[in-house]
Amino acid sequence: MQTAESRVGEGSDSPTARACKTGMQKLRGLFIKGSKGRLRGDGNDEEAMAGKRGTLEYNEEEEAMEEISDLPEINRSGSKPFGSGWGPASPATPRGLLGGAQPVARDASLEHHAPPEWVVTYVRLLRGRPLRWFFLLLWLSLTLSGASIYFPLTRILKISVEPPYGSESEAAKITYAENFPPEPVTLVALLSTNQRNAPNQTLINADAEMQLELLPPFFSYNPEGDLTAETESISLDLKKRVQPYLELVEWPADVASGQQAGEASAERGGTSVRASGVPAPPPSPAQLKPKCEFNFYSFFDMPFEVQMVAHSFLFPSNFGGQEGMIAVHLVSCYGHAIYKECVYKHEWFCEPVAELLESWAGYREWRMEEFPESPVDLTFVSYPVVYEDIIMGIEWGMALSTVATILAFIVLAIMLRNIRQLGLVACNILTGIGTTLLIMYPVSYYVMDVNVCAPAMLVAVALAMSIDYSLFLLTRFNEERLDGRSITQSLEIALATQGHTIVVSGATLALCFTSMLVLPTSTITSMAAGAATAVLQSVLVSLSLTPALLLTMPRFFTADRMLGLTLDGTPFGTYRRASSGTVAQFGATIDRPTIIENPQPKKESIWAHLGRCSQRGAPVMFLFLALVMVPFAMALTRFSYVEDLTPLMQTTHPATKAFISISNIYGQDLTTPVQLLIMAPSQKAMASREWSLATCHMLQDLATKVTDRMHEEGHDYTMTTADFNGLMIFRGGCLADGLKFGVIDVMPAVHMYGMYDMVADLLSNRNQTATQVYVHCQVDLFSEVGEAWMRAVRASLPRPEVIRQPLGGHQDADSANYVPYGRWDDVEIGALHLYGMPLEQMDGAQYTLRRMPVVVLAIAAIICVILGGSFGTALVPVRAVICIAWMLVVTFGASVMVYQLGYLEGLGIQALSPSSGQALFWISPSVAVAVLVGLGLDYDIFLMDSVMEHWQSGKDGKSAVVTSLDQAGTIISAAGVIMFLAFGSLLIGASPMINQLAFHLCVGVLIDCFVTTKVIIPCAMAMLDLLPGNANFWPRKPPPALTEPTVEPLPPLRRLGSLRNSLSDNARRSAMSPHGVRSMQSPA
């Protein structure tokens, strides 16, 4: 009987026969030696020994088979190398949502090109242990380090919206930080009459009149039906819970020494150098001091004279006495000033504040349980509680994204058909997030203020990009394995093809996010920096960690029998030899990929059919798409935005409801006040009566100027002198002339009871050289009239002497940076700044939206440069810009329809209903632009990579895009479904800003995956094909016509035992050309 070796010898003159003979000799030596055998002379000894040591790496038999498959005369066919990074087309393997993994025939017009030399070298280096383990240990250490700094990072994040660089609001904020302690924090107890248990009753007599018969004057508090006793009882109970924090205690010995450091830290934003959660050291003998400085304000604790002033404020008459307030001003603890974020950041000196909040909350729950029929409702709100509300909304959104990741992994498992490879994706996600956090920590500490939303943003981007890139890379790897190629070959091809896609996509996305750095507010630029870093990390991790893990445990990650739910490729798998003892066989633990020798043609997928249909009537389809865009474009013309704090808060949280109630009852002066900062020339000047009168007169004149300016702009608004309240003016009158109620001057009583000094301490700095005046707005500050009022006040400030001074830090070219330095009544008043969170948000929105056209143009330029340089064509980037512009118009038009016009309000879904102000929160569309552009380009680049690959193989533009949709359409659809699940989960959250951002991303992703790539791109390429020449890929020249070569499929490699039969089949291929491509003509 003729042996395989003798049959090979018959064609010993051909290179293929010589290669097969050499391989046969090596295999014979291997099989004789058995499990102790070792390959020599090919540089793979190290990998062969790894299998003998029982690891999950290559064993000797698999390495032998790879050596045979690696022979260039057999598998490495191709007449020319990869051009510009393009590789072989994806095999026509329907996977995932529309079908299982079945091996089918490749397009015969595609030649298998050899991967670039640098890819081969890179994979060869990864197969060696030094580089592979270097990558594994490097990413592991970076990931663990990033996870360890997550909580320290959250303590230096900024919750508030930062003012734009170089704006007047930034100048005011810098001035405030330099001259005043952190903004005061107030804990408010809101008392309301329970209309169910006590209808039409009042907390206190709001109509009480001053009795002039007796001195001092007093009020009558006991008319019939009032709930005065209940209200006073609540006041006493709350005061008892405050009292323990006012007692004299022994301060820790190191508090005094660390006090100056704490004050300096507070000036930088309140970050303490002491670690979070570390209790104060045990006290040592020291001077007794109050633990905290809390000022308790209750109507029932005030003298009669003060009650006359506070009555109408604490129990507003316009609410009929059914609403009341008890407040605690949280000044300091252990000598450290309390600031808004200190509880959230777990500062050690804020522990008493957190305890007080818990104590009051416990009291409220106790009252609800003990007195369910109580006629008085009690709620609490303060900025620490509000910030906790915001943080909980963001963390809840991150938690929902994590849950959605489970659904995303299910889709990935369907696509990859190997659950084990989900471990690779999970490693990519965790590593990308961990390393990005590690980079953002020094950025937030030394470079820029990082907003609290930045971690959520970078986590979402890292999650999205890691999943996308892993899906692209692993899908191509599995397809090549299914085609019978070795792990090394499959990895080389995947890196050469999808690696190019990942690099181009990542570079484009990172530059798009980087373009947002031109925006003038750190609230958005910090999110952009985090997103750009996350994208770059996802690229690096996908191209280094994934190949390293695949080559470290190849049998484990490629064993996909029963979706990988077996012990194949593990130390617990079975291993047995053939009965003949000559050829080793693998048992049921290893599921080798097989190849159908005569595969059946694949039925065209729905995506290819959709693309072909859009091409048949391309002009009609183009017109239809333009008509579809019209209503969305019309809705977009009605776009408006809102600035407020409530869109950041959870709609269902009790703190949100209490915050809104206090704003409605007591006005925004209590929740989001606007202050006029006055920097007096000196302490002596500020203490003088002349300065007080001149400043008061200036404010009275300012009210008149603001009214005139508002009328000129067409707003029916009249500002009165009573809208100013400060040390020099109250209720429109100058305090230097006294404070009169009727004919009685109560100013002496105010001084006698120390009320004036207490207010002076609150409104002035320590050196008594600067003070604040609260400015009241009669309308909503965040409305159109409110913004016009703020601009009018700022523009009407006296500017007899205008000084242009640098403010330090970032400067904005279109900002004046003028500081008004006023004089009035021949008295030098000092520098004036209008300060407050509403002004910061107004400036942030205006500056950002003013710069958005620059960002859009920068993104368009980036797209043209990156795509043009990568694909070498002029019209591909232009077409991409047009497609993305169409998607953005439809997406933002839809958001206006939902959140402004209320088209979906009838569904009763809170996340799809208009928020406060019937407008979009200004941050949501600003952030969504770059993310939508990035995701759209991601799928566009992936599709165009495949199109270029087919075009280089000889197809025209129309056929290339249809074939690409046939092969990559399901992958793009799966990626879109995964992104929709990740972003759609955020719609379940209760934060309006996150809901709006999620809506933008969900709509944009669906349009990109199911309209842009499936309809618009095929339609556009069909229309460009109508032009003369090679319009789609101009100025590139089409490849030379091919002689219709075909690549014969490799023989079936169902098990290693059949390798000799495979070699016999290879010997019969001796008539093949040296490149492994059979000529269409008969061999000579």
Image (cartoon, helix red, strand yellow):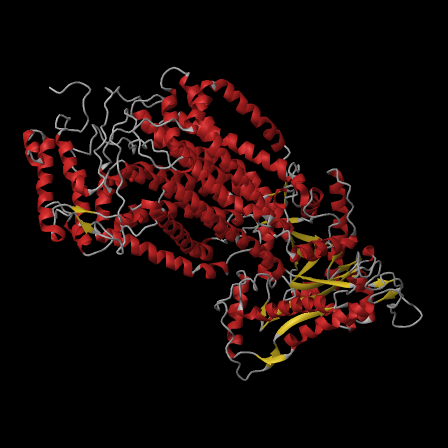
Q: Quadrant of residue 1048?
A: top left
Determine whether, in the image, residue 793 is placed left or right of residue 307. left
Q: Position of residue 258 (x, y in %)?
A: 51, 72
**Residue sitting nearer the eye, 602 or 668:** 602
Q: Is residue 22 left or right of residue 80?
A: left
Depth order, front residue of 813/859: 859
Residue at 49% of width from left, 43% of height from top?
A: 981
**For residue 275, side relative to residue 298 (left or right):** left
Residue at 40%, 46% (x, y): give it. 466
Q: x%, y% of residue 268?
A: 52, 61
Picture coordinates of residue 694, whole percent (x, y)? 74, 57
Which residue extends farthest top? 1028
Q: Please say if 149 is above or below 628.
A: below
Q: Quadrant of the N terminus?
A: top left
**184 is higher (above) or lower (below) than 882:** below
The quadrant holding residue 1060 is top left
**Number of callouts in the render?**
0
Is there any visible trace of residue 402 in the rendered image? yes
Give how far across and how far down residue 145 sits, in percent: 38, 59
| 121 in relation to 650, above or below | above
In this view of the protein, which residue sits in the foreground, 694 or 326?
A: 326
- Nearer to the camera, 296 or 11: 11
In the depicted structure, whether residue 685 falls above or below residue 562: below
Q: Decide if residue 814 is in sight here.
A: no
Q: Which quadrant would the C terminus be assigned to in this image? A: top left
- Outermost residue on the bottom side: it is 285
